[in-house]
Image (spheres, grey):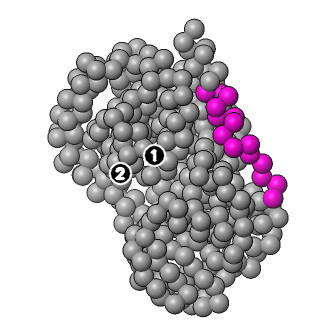
């Protein structure tokens, strides 16, 4: 079967989990990828000659969270150029590779291609939980507008798929047909490792200013923090900034005693699988991140906080034994559920 796989360029979590699915699909199918930005570069490196670069949509993020106005204006400014470029790539794709089926990880180009050519379409992502499941978490007044906006965007982004596979580290009652919950997609590099506790705390942070974060972490001089996200190597005593490398990050992640981060799905779900308590600080105006953090708090896998402060981190660390005990109850058999569900769907849709 020929499969077109669409991956958004916003956030590397989409690319890393899509890499796992694509590698599985390539064992029995011919796959072409469409993506943008860093995600395209990442996938093109791992699957040379199979990825096509398109112009994608990007969020404008500042210290105050997602800027809706700046995101909107940048989209308008780049829109005409992006449309022309994507049209050329659309023509090229139809001339060189006509798929039998399309899979979208919340990506619009592949969705539109599938609808125009009336091809079967499968959605694989985590964010559909907001639209297709019942959220059993409190939604504060300050998040209600974000919730409504997120729901509308999700419903409009990839509607009317043949099936929706929703990756999740928590349970949420499904309320729409053609929808299945599956455990998070985990990288083989992570599955091959055995988690240990060497006493350090891993920090994954891109939204907070470097100096502000270091100043907060320096106040806890008995703890050792390994910080990723600023892509530099710098020593601040008990705080060590580290340039990104997959091997280094995996080693530090799997041997940490706890994790501090914003609430991106991939990092959060991997921390849960590894049994690492998570201090989650969702980026403002990103409701998906609030959902992830709220469920971390609900399940006792960690705590949700509005900001990274010394007092918040101390409160989180004080309860580590409780979080560790709750995390011991989490169970997941690698990516087996994903592979079984996907294989079954492909068989049904190709019949």
Give the camera-side residue of 186 and 153.
186
- Tag 1 near tag 2, CB within 8 Å: yes
Give the camera-side residue of 246 and 147.
246
Indicate which disc residue 125 carries: none
Horizontal relation, residue 286 to residue 163: left or right: left
Magenta region? 328-342
Q: Secondary structure at mark 1?
A: helix
Residue at 69 percent of width and 78 percent of height: 199
Q: Is residue 74 above or below residue 236?
A: above
Give the camera-side residue of 200 and 177.
200
Residue at 57 percent of width and 20 percent of height: 346
> Which residue lies under the disc numbered 1?
15
Indicate which disc residue 38 carries: 2
> Residue 12 at x, y = what percent?
44, 52
Q: Is residue 3 above or below residue 64?
A: above
**Snapshot quadrant of residue 251:** bottom right
Of all residues, the one furthest to the top in this rendering is 351
Residue at 77 percent of width and 59 percent of height: 327
Q: Is residue 143 visible?
A: no
Q: Is residue 350 above or below residue 158?
A: above
Q: CA distance from mark 1 to mark 2?
A: 9 Å
Residue at 48 percent of width and 70 percent of height: 228
Q: How many labels, in total?
A: 2
Q: Earlier in the sequence, mark 1 or mark 2?
A: 1
| CA neighbours of label 2 inside 10 A, class few (<14), some (14 to 19), many (20+) | some
């Amino acid at each position: 079967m020929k499969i077109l796989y669409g991956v958004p360029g916003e956030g590397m979590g989409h690319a890393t989990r899509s890499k796992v699915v694509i590698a599985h699909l390539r064992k029995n199918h011919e796959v072409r990828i469409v993506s943008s930005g860093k995600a395209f570069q990442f996938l093109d490196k791992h699957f040379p000659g199979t990825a096509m670069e398109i112009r994608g949509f990007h969020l404008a993020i500042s210290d105050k969270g997602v800027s809706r106005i700046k995101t909107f204006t940048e989209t308008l400014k780049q829109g005409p150029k992006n449309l022309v470029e994507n049209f050329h790539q659309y023509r090229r794709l139809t001339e060189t590779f006509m798929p039998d089926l399309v899979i979208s990880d919340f990506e619009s180009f592949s969705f539109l291609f599938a609808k125009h050519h009336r091809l079967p379409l499968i959605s694989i992502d985590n964010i559909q939980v907001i639209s297709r499941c019942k959220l059993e978490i409190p939604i504060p007044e300050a998040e209600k507008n974000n919730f409504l906006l997120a729901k509308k965007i999700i419903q409009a982004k990839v509607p009317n798929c043949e099936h929706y596979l929703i990756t999740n580290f928590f349970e949420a009652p499904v309320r729409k047909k053609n929808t299945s919950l599956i455990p998070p997609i985990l990288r083989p590099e992570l599955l091959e490792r055995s988690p240990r506790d060497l006493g350090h705390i891993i920090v994954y942070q891109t939204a907070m200013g470097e100096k502000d974060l270091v100043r907060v972490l320096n106040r806890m001089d008995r703890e050792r923090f390994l910080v990723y996200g600023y892509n530099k190597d710098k020593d601040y005593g008990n705080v060590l900034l580290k340039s990104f490398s997959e091997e280094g990050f995996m080693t530090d992640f799997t041997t940490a005693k706890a994790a501090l981060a914003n609430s991106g799905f991939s990092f959060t779900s991997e921390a849960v699988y590894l049994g690492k308590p998570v201090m989650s600080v969702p980026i403002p105006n990103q409701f998906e991140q609030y959902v992830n953090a709220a469920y971390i708090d609900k399940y006792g896998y960690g705590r949700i906080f509005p900001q990274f402060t010394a007092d918040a981190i101390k409160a989180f660390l004080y309860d580590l034994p409780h979080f560790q005990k709750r995390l011991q109850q989490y169970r997941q058999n690698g990516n087996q559920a994903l592979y079984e569900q996907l294989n079954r769907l492909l068989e049904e849709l190709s019949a």
